[in-house]
Amino acid sequence: MTHLLALSELSVQQIEGLLERAQAIQDHGVAPRITEPAFVANLFFEPSTRTRFSFEVAEKRLGFNVLNVEEATSSVQKGETLYDTLRLLEEIGVRAAVIRHFEAGFYKDLRDRLTLSIINAGDGDGHHPSQTLLDLLTMRQEFQQFQGLTVAMIGDLRHSRVARSNAEVLHRLGVKVILTGPKAWQDPSFPGSYVSIDEAVETADVVNLLRIQKERHREMDGFTPEAYHQAYGLTLKRAQAMKPEAIIMHPAPFNRDVEIASELVESKQSRIFKQMHNGVFMRMAIMEWACQGRPNANNQRIELTV
Amino acid sequence: MTHLLALSELSVQQIEGLLERAQAIQDHGVAPRITEPAFVANLFFEPSTRTRFSFEVAEKRLGFNVLNVEEATSSVQKGETLYDTLRLLEEIGVRAAVIRHFEAGFYKDLRDRLTLSIINAGDGDGHHPSQTLLDLLTMRQEFQQFQGLTVAMIGDLRHSRVARSNAEVLHRLGVKVILTGPKAWQDPSFPGSYVSIDEAVETADVVNLLRIQKERHREMDGFTPEAYHQAYGLTLKRAQAMKPEAIIMHPAPFNRDVEIASELVESKQSRIFKQMHNGVFMRMAIMEWACQGRPNANNQRIELTV
Amino acid sequence: MTHLLALSELSVQQIEGLLERAQAIQDHGVAPRITEPAFVANLFFEPSTRTRFSFEVAEKRLGFNVLNVEEATSSVQKGETLYDTLRLLEEIGVRAAVIRHFEAGFYKDLRDRLTLSIINAGDGDGHHPSQTLLDLLTMRQEFQQFQGLTVAMIGDLRHSRVARSNAEVLHRLGVKVILTGPKAWQDPSFPGSYVSIDEAVETADVVNLLRIQKERHREMDGFTPEAYHQAYGLTLKRAQAMKPEAIIMHPAPFNRDVEIASELVESKQSRIFKQMHNGVFMRMAIMEWACQGRPNANNQRIELTV
């Protein structure tokens, strides 16, 4: 089996291969179909619309049968361990499980004990590799190469699994990462240097806003939404200081007029909905790869190896 | 895109076209299939079995891939606006969204901002066009034409989106609408005149009972279920006074022995389950239309236009 | 229609026919497909992962379209009776309904009033026929015949619908059933004789552990998990006293280190995950049978008879 747990486990070459395959799927509009009925499962232990349905569309476009396992109605309530649930899924024929879990590193003691592939769809404040990959795909479409780019990551760095995944990989790809946000949410473990919000917006090629994780820290550490918007949000005024070719990104869901002025969400420089569009193709490439052990280079029909 | 939001926006000719297409699907037992993989989504922000699964069957019989978005497990919990959720669905490839929402007119500021089709599956105490259309289909099968019919709408008029939709359209189709129900639930905005419950039952061609919306007004304004049944329900005794060719309808779910005597639910004059049966064909015609911009006249394969 | 409600309603010959068909599906790896689009529904009024998804995989492998009806989001909340919900499903084209319900015998006043097939997926503390059949399939693979086997059922007999179903059928198949467990959970209505836990483990060909139904009796009648494990669990020490050819079974989900020592779950003698594997094939045979009225002897395409 091939798991996708954290991009830190993949080489630059492997990452490039996945991005190329996603781009090819998008460009040629043809998805290779599965050669025989095969099942995948989505297990979301935290709410999600974007990631969950993006994966479901990707899976169905590849021809997989999809099982949606929801905590509220499952045996997880009866105290079953995640390992035992996944072993069950293996036994009934599931090839890959896309899992969002509230616990960072939930996969650590599972990875070597299963034959199905685990796709990490977000683990606590850990990683979110499919989001990082679709962010990279979006940047790649815009700038063709990563080397020499400056990406500003703005906001709730400490609680954002997207920020963590992105910063690590961008650094490896030769991108200059700059960081900004409230003191309480800074995180010294990130590669990259802290700058002021205005310097970040003015110098970045990519202004990557991060969602305020209201559900993780109920109080915004003293900020009202308005105060946050003025202090660290992309206001209309700040956006005017962006470089002409620079783009706005956000993993969404976004809080309008908090991280970003509502009018900017669909502005000319925004790629926020483009990110969602790219997500399906990226996840098709990921699901192919998980079931084959390598990116699908020649657009052939998927021969399942698990 | 073609939305179906309220039948008041459709001409009589458009309505007739949809009814004819639904009848043709039912008669010829053949559904045109989608020419390529296409996705639709069902978003139900209020509980539903009938409407939700009737649409799901209709969608799958047409060959659509179906996404079921449920509030409890989605990003709506994170405060995302409905517009942003629908834009997401557009970006991942969804052609049409069937939406039930607790807010009347939820679609008003969405309709001109989206490329996907919105099918209103019930908005607060506003409209419920697919229910109205399947009601019309049921009457049409029985009486061939609408002109000259008398339809009695009985019960909770004020809170019933079905009553509101039906009364408006029936009036336009040349149907005489008569109304009856408790004073507190009468609504002067309806076309049609108020009569006594007994006159309504005795003179109507269609005795259209309305569900008591227990979840909308907890107390039944002073009525016990038994008292309501005696005052405004279709009792066994009242049913005997119906015209021989008259039929009983109810949008369901019904409260047995409240709106209707339990023994009458599957009586010879009842079309209540026939309405449910018709619902699938009606919704197949609606989904075709939403994705084509017109009823599918020649039973051809659907070429998606969105 | 053909219902599967309790195995006590099936002859030994019918049971053997279903087991043979399940084995044939497993051996020949080919599933006959439905000749035209057909719908089945899964209604789970209690949480389930194993049974629910095992049925869903079985249904989809047979080519059925699947509707998943969940209590939380359905009209059951509006007070609709189960009969009315099932009549609705009939009207929209559903051929068979797989139902888990908290009420034992929920199907009693439904069975003669419906044209769709009801598959009982567990009714309160009543029956669980598909689980019993997959247990039988697992034993049959191991021992070829039932006559002469000794099966020990250990633990929460009183609250286990699996135990009740299994004991009755095993008795009819010529199996010697022995029982053990805490006094408070014994049930005099079971066929079979009570022995000590150690005698049960030492003499059985099949050590069939039962799940402690924590959700049915909050307190374990005075036992701590550790105390239960020592008194009635399959400890490592007890397992060493098993006959060399004997196997361990458990309907799952299991409580590790309560009913069974965690190390034994995937031990050489355990067939616990094999049971889950067999479940899909068994349920494919059941769904074929429900829609045809007999086991599918010649692996032909399914002609739906309902």
Image: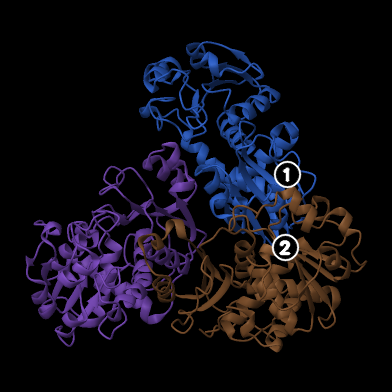
Chain colours: A purple, B brown, C blue
On the picture, is A162 further left or further right than C255?
left
Q: Which residue is mark 2?
A: B155
The amino acid marked with disc number 1 is: His
- Which class describes the residues within 10 Å of circle 1: few (<14), some (14-19), or many (20+)? many
Secondary element under disc 1, as helix, strand or loop, is loop
- For the point 52% across and 43% down, which residue is it? C48
- Name the one closer to the observer, B121 or A24: B121
- For the point 63% across and 69% down, which residue is it? B161
On the picture, is B35 further left or further right than A234?
right
Relative to C166, residue B117 above or below: below
Q: Are marks 1 and 2 on the same chain?
A: no
Relative to A67, residue C210 above or below: above
Residue B199 in percent (x, y) is at 86, 67
The amino acid marked with disc number 2 is: Gly
Q: Quadrant of residue B241?
A: bottom right
Q: Which residue is mark 1?
A: C3
Q: Are marks 1 and 2 in contact (CB under 8 Å)?
A: no
On the picture, is A222 further left or further right than B215?
left
**Callout in the foreground (1, 2):** 2
Q: Which mark is residue A109?
A: none
Secondary element under disc 2, as helix, strand or loop, is loop
> CA separation, marks 1 and 2?
38 Å
